[in-house]
Amino acid sequence: MATAAAPSSSSSPSTTSAPQPSTTPSRHLTPTTTPIPLLPTPTARLYNHIHPALTLSLFYLSFPSLVADPVSTLSKLLLPLAALQGIYSVLCLPIAQAGAFPRGGGGAPGRRKNKPGEKKKDLSAEWIGKIPVLLSALLTLTLAAPILLIFLILFGAPLTTHFAHNALCATHMAVLALMPLFYVYGVHAGTWREISAASLPWDGVWGGTVGTVVGAWLGAVPIPLDW
């Protein structure tokens, strides 16, 4: 009796496996931050246009004394500049989410509704909105300014002389570039990785930071040409 021959392995059709997607995590930083909108108030829209003019006027009116005595003038300008940046942050920008500051200092939450029959105003809630701007100023002066000073020295600023000039320059840059960033982002590590990688979406806050850095670079480039 005839038996059916087993099919030869050579006659079986060749099969190719489909390429499997790589499970290796990508090393590229994928931005997750969305642009920061202005607060939806008429005051925010108005002051957003006034603030650059006030800041420029502050330096323009102080320019003669800035040339004559840089250290004294920059020291006197620091408090008004920080005040202008704080006013801009409070009037125009949303507060960082709760938990973005140490010990939950940030976040729009913190206000509570009065219970039925409760008429006493919670004064502590009124201060909650002021805490983030104070923390932003503190972080700017104690953390950002020293780091920027190190960068200025690494990029060629004198190390053994003109220390006060360099420190005040770094502090002014920190107030202009980073104080609003601390206000809207807090100290969230993921967001600051995006900031260090210059991958934030374009908005008014990030534009101010980029403008400060580019302006400082353009101001320093002609220095070697000063014969």
Image: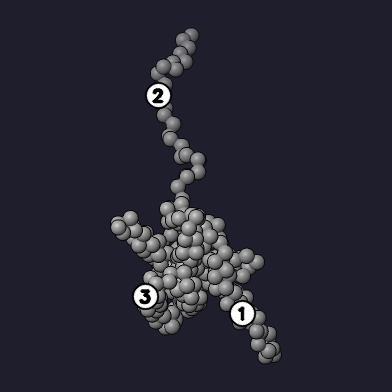
Left or right of residue 143: residue 215:
left
1 and 3 marks in contact (CB < 8 Å): no
Q: CA distance from mark 1 to mark 3?
A: 39 Å
* Three-letter amino acid code of the residue under disc 3: Pro
Q: CA distance from mark 2 to mark 1?
A: 76 Å
Toward which corner of the image does residue 57 lie, by quadrant?
Answer: bottom left
* Three-letter amino acid code of the residue under disc 1: Trp
Q: Nearer the viewer, mark 3 or mark 2?
A: 3
Disc 3 marks which residue?
Answer: 64
> From the viewer's perspective, is residue 14 above or below residue 155?
above
Tell me where residue 10 appears, x and y as whole percent: 41, 17
> From the viewer's perspective, is residue 24 above or below residue 94?
above
Disc 2 marks which residue?
Answer: 13
Disc 1 marks which residue?
Answer: 127
Residue 194 visible in rendering: no
Give the class, few, some or many, for how many residues have Cα within 10 Å of label 1's Cα (few <14, many ≥20): few
What is the image's colouring? one colour
Q: Residue at x 57, y 77 (%)?
A: 130
First along the sequence among labels 1 and 3:
3
Callout 3: helix, strand or loop? helix
**Total numbered badges shown on the rendered structure:** 3
First along the sequence among labels 3 and 2:
2
| Observer-nearest of 200 and 153 | 153
Q: Residue at x 34, y 58 (%)?
A: 223
Q: Quadrant of the C terminus?
A: bottom left
Q: CA distance from mark 3 to mark 2?
A: 87 Å
Q: Residue at x 40, y 65 (%)?
A: 212
Callout 1: helix, strand or loop? helix
Q: Nearer the viewer, mark 1 or mark 3?
A: 3
Tell me where residue 226 appears, x and y as whole percent: 31, 59
